[in-house]
Amino acid sequence: MCGIVGAISKNRNILPILITGLKNLEYRGYDSAGVAYLKNNKINIVKTSGKVSKLENKLNKSDESNIGIAHTRWATHGKATSVNAHPHRVNHITIVHNGIIENFKEIKEMLENNNYSFKSSTDTEVGCALLNYYYEKFKDVDKTIKAFMDKVMGSYAITMIIDSDLDNLYVLKKESPLVIGISDNTNIVASDIRAILKYTNKYYILDDFEYAKISSNEVIIKSIKGEILNKELHTLDLKDNDNSKGHYKHYMLKEIMEQKTTILKTVLPFIEEGIDSLMTLPDLTKYKEIFIVGCGTAYHAGLVAKYLFEEVTNTRCSVYLASEYRYQNNFLSKDTLTIFISQSGETADTIAALKLVKSKGYPTLGIINVENSTISYLVDTCLYTKAGSEIAVASTKAYTAQVALLSILVHSHGLRNKTISRDNTIEVIDEFKSIEKLITPLLNDKDTYLSIAKNIYKEEDIFYIGRGLDYYLSMEGALKLKEISYIHSESYAAGELKHGTISLIKKNTPVIASATNSNLNAKTISNLKEVLARGADIYLICDDNYKDDTFTIVNIPRASEFVKPILVIIPYQLIAYYTATLRGTDIDKPKNLAKSVTVE
Ligand code: G6P
C-alpha cells in the first residue's frame, strides 16, 4: 500500500533517490504519487494520479535538490486524484503520511473553527494542518510533535519538512513502519528499507511514539517525552534481497520458480540434524488448543496447518481471518497459543488482532517472512520463513514457505505428543530434503498448464472444489486465479455443491479440483461426475494415476500429508499464472490490490 521515501543530503541531488525509492515501493500497490522538494528556496510539489513513471515525466529534468519527500498513495479517504495525492502542504509544513488518522473529522472541525480550510478529502491534509497549528502555537518542533501524538488516534508514519528548518527532515511514527537509512552525508527515510537498498543497508527502525530529526549527517531519535534514544543500527543482509526480475517476464513466475530453493531454505535449520533440530522448535504440548490468525494467503496457509494439527496430531486448531477475529468472542485462555501468519509482518488487521491477544496477556507466535517487521517485534516468539523478497502481489513462494514451516512445526508437536513416530519423521525429513527434485517436474510442465489456460481464459466463472486438505488448497488455487486474471473463481467443499452451487453449472463451466486423499478421492470424483453430467469441463489434480478420459488430469507425485500441500499448489499457481498471461493482465500488480495491506 502507501509508500514513503524522504532524503536529505549535503552533496547529492536527492531527486533520483526519491524516484528510485518510489519505484521500488510500486509493487506494494498504489494509485497516485507525489514529491515535494526544495527548489529556489521554496518547496515545490509535483503530484499525479497513476504511476510513478508519470510523476517522473512531470518533473523538470534539470531540477536538483538536497531535501525532499515522496509518496505513493493507495486511496482510502478520497479518490485517487492528484489533489488527494501526497505530499500535502499547509502553511509552513509539508508532509507525506502512511496510515489513517481515525479522529480526523473531529480534528478537522477544530481546525475549521480556527480558520483552516482544506483542498483535499484526505485525513493526511488534516494531519498536516494540525502539525502546522501546533507549530504556529508552540514555535517548537518537540512540543509540536508531542501535541500531535497526544491528539491523533490511529496510525501514522509521517515525514515532514518545515519551511523554517530546511536543514532537517522530521519523521514521527505510530503503528506504520518507518526506517531511517544512513549513508555518507546523505540520510534517507523509507517505509521499507528494501526501497532504498541501492543507497544503504544500514538503518534505524523507529518504534511507536518515537520521532527523529534528520540532517544530512546526523540522526537524533527521541521518545514522545523528548528524551534522546540510543537506538540500534541495523544492517540488512543484501544477499537475501535480490529484487531483480532476472530473465523472467514477471516477478510472479520468478517467485514460483524460486520455490525450488525457498522451501528447503525455510525448513533446513529445523531438519538439518534430524530429530534434534526439530526439537529446537517451540514446544506446543503445553497448549490445549492452537489458534491461527492471518489474512488472504496467510489464512489459507493456516488452514493447512489446522488440517495437520487436527488430523495428524489430534490437537484442536481453529483458524481465523484477522479482520473477523478482533470482533468476535475469541475464547482465549492461558491454554491457547495464537499463531500469527504474515508474509509482510505489516498487515493492519493481523497486527490489530495480535495486539488484542497481547493486551490480554496470552502467548503468541509469529510465522513471518520480513525480518524486523512490526509483527516480528510484537510476538513473543518469531519463526521466519526464508522466502526472500516477494514482489508479486499474489503470494506464491511465501505461501509454500509458510506451509512448510507450519508442517515442520506440527511435525515436531506430533513427535512430542507421540502421535507421530520417529520413523515417520525420518521419511518426512527426507521428503523435504528432496523437495527440489519433487517439484521441478511440476514447475517445468508449462505445456499442461498452458493448455488448461487456453481452455479457461475466456470464462468469467470458474469453480474450485476439494475435500479435506484438498478443499483448503483449492481455496488458495481460486484466490490465485481471481487475483491475477480477474476471473470470478470460488472454491467449495465438494460435498456442498449439491446444496446450492451446482445450480450455476452449465455447459463448459470449468471446475478445477484436487483429490489427493485416498479416503476421500472416490467421493470427490463422484462430485465431479455430477458436475460433468451437467456439462462442466473438469480439470483434476491427483496423485494416484487416476485415469478418466472425460477429465483433464494433472498428475503429481505421491508424498506425505506434510509435503503434499506444496505439490498440489504448484499446478494451481501455474494454471492461474498462464491464464492471466492469456488475458493480458498486469500480473505482478493486479488492479485494486496491494502487496501489504496496511489499513484495516
Ligand atoms: C494482501 C496480499 C496477499 C496477502 C495478504 C496478507 O491481500 O495481496 O497476497 O496474502 O495481504 O498479507 P501478509 O503480508 O499479512 O501475509
Image: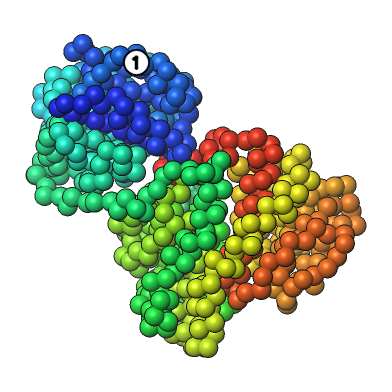
- The residue under the point 85% across, 65% down is 548
Judge whether 434 appears above or below 238 on screen. below
Using residue 13 as the reference point, say whether residue 281 is left or right of it: right
Indicate the quadrant where residue 306 lies. bottom right
Residue extending farthest to the top is 40
Using residue 193 as the reference point, say whether residue 402 is left or right of it: right
- The residue under the point 76% across, 49% down is 451
Judge whether 72 appears above or below 529 on screen. above
Residue 384 visible, this angle: yes
What is the x, y in percent for residue 114? 25, 17
Residue extending farthest to the front is 247
How many numbered marks have been drawn onto this rendered protein structure?
1
> SS class of the residue under badge 1?
loop
Residue 124 visible, this angle: no
Using residue 426 as the reference point, say whether residue 211 is left or right of it: left
Crowding near pointer 1: few (<14 within 10 Å), some, many (20+)? Answer: few
Relative to the observer, which residue lies in front, 114 or 37? 37
Q: Quadrant of the C terminus?
A: top left
- The residue under the point 26% across, 46% down is 201
Indicate the quadrant where residue 272 lies. bottom left
Relative to the observer, which residue lies in front, 422 or 473? 422
What is the x, y in percent for residue 297? 54, 54
What is the x, y in percent for residue 437? 57, 68
Indicate the amino acid at tag 1: Lys
Residue under numbered circle 1 = 61
Relative to the observer, which residue lies in front, 276 or 90? 276
- The residue under the point 15% across, 22% down is 166
What is the x, y in percent for residue 90? 27, 18
